[in-house]
Amino acid sequence: MQIEDSTKIQAKSVFGIDTFGTLYYATDNNTFNKKTKDTTITYANFQLGEITTANSFNPLKINLFYKDFNTVVILDNRLAEVFKVDFNTLQDYKNVSFVSTGFDNTLWIFNQDLQQLELYDYKTNKIKQKTVPIQSEVLDLKSDYNNCYMLTEKYLYVYNYFGSLIAKHTNTGYKSMAFSKAHLVLRKENNLFLLSKNSNEIKPIEHPNLLISQFLVTNETLYIYHDEILRQYQLKLQ
């Protein structure tokens, strides 16, 4: 797999890059950045500490998850705060360990105390769907409007937007994943694997022998971030 482009960037965490090259990342001072070719705009909430995850799948409703404070902040495309969910203050308290984007005003959240995945409407403060309790530790959570992928120590679960389980794959050592539209990329040590939508086969991805601090996928493009360099590749199977 040949490198197509590379960008030097000082980031603590890289969260996303869209088809227009807009980059979403956090710096060491826990500031969230949206960088286009021409401008960079920022959002910071120092009271909430470190950004655990950020999901820019819907650029009009970007969600930032601050796990230490059990809080989610929703931002618009100008990074203005439009909604805040403090799970500590809800009447039905939730101890949340993972957050990802759902459709409309929903978030997929993993309720640590109940050990179940929930589709939560933050505008109405209602659970629209929930799964049966999960029996193994959750490692990662990724989603779009239609599907939610939950990686646990034992299995990779795939749910539709109704919360119904539509696929289940044995986890053979995967620790994290990245997702974009038609492709789910899984990481096992320094190797990457691809699960395409509507496919049940997980295939190895051919890539240079690089150290991987983080990885992202946007459509057919794979991004690998390490040592302040974000490298861009065309997805290619072995």
Image (spheres, rainbow, N blue to C red):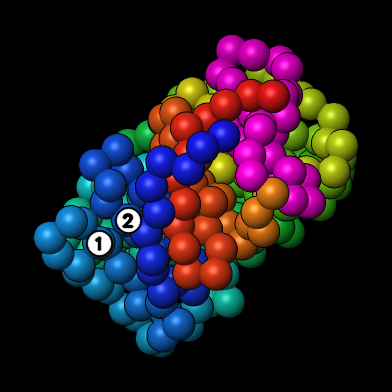
Residue 175 visible in the current orientation: no
Q: Which residue is mark 1?
A: 35
Residue found 58% across the figure and 76% down from its top: 68
Q: For residue 168, what is the image quadrant?
A: top right
Numbered disc 2: secondary structure:
strand
Residue found 28% across the figure and 47% down from its top: 21
Residue found 40% across the figure and 54% down from its top: 6
Asked if the stretch drawn in magenta spans residue 204, the answer is yes
Q: Quadrant of the N terminus?
A: top right
Q: Is residue 7 above or below residue 217?
A: below
Q: Residues within 10 Å of mark 1 (few under 14, many from 20)?
A: some
- Measuring from the top left, give residue 164's x and y in whole percent: 63, 22
Q: Which residue is mark 2?
A: 23
- Measuring from the top left, give residue 228's x and y in whole percent: 48, 69
Image check: 9 left or right of 189? left
Q: Residues within 10 Å of mark 2 (few under 14, many from 20)?
A: some
Numbered disc 1: secondary structure:
strand
Q: Of residues 129 and 232, which is closer to you in this image?
A: 232
Residue 29 visible in the current orientation: yes
Image check: 64 left or right of 2? left
Q: Compare marks 2 and 1 and give the one earlier in the sequence.
A: 2
Q: Quadrant of the C terminus?
A: top right
- Please say if the residues under marks 2 and 1 sit with CB atoms less than 8 Å apart: yes
Asked if the stretch drawn in magenta spans residue 198, the answer is yes
Q: Is residue 49 above or below residue 227?
A: below
Give the amino acid at mark 2: Leu
Residue found 41% across the figure and 85% down from its top: 29
Q: Of residues 96 and 175, which is closer to you in this image?
A: 175
Give the amino acid at mark 1: Lys
> What's the magenta region?
184-208
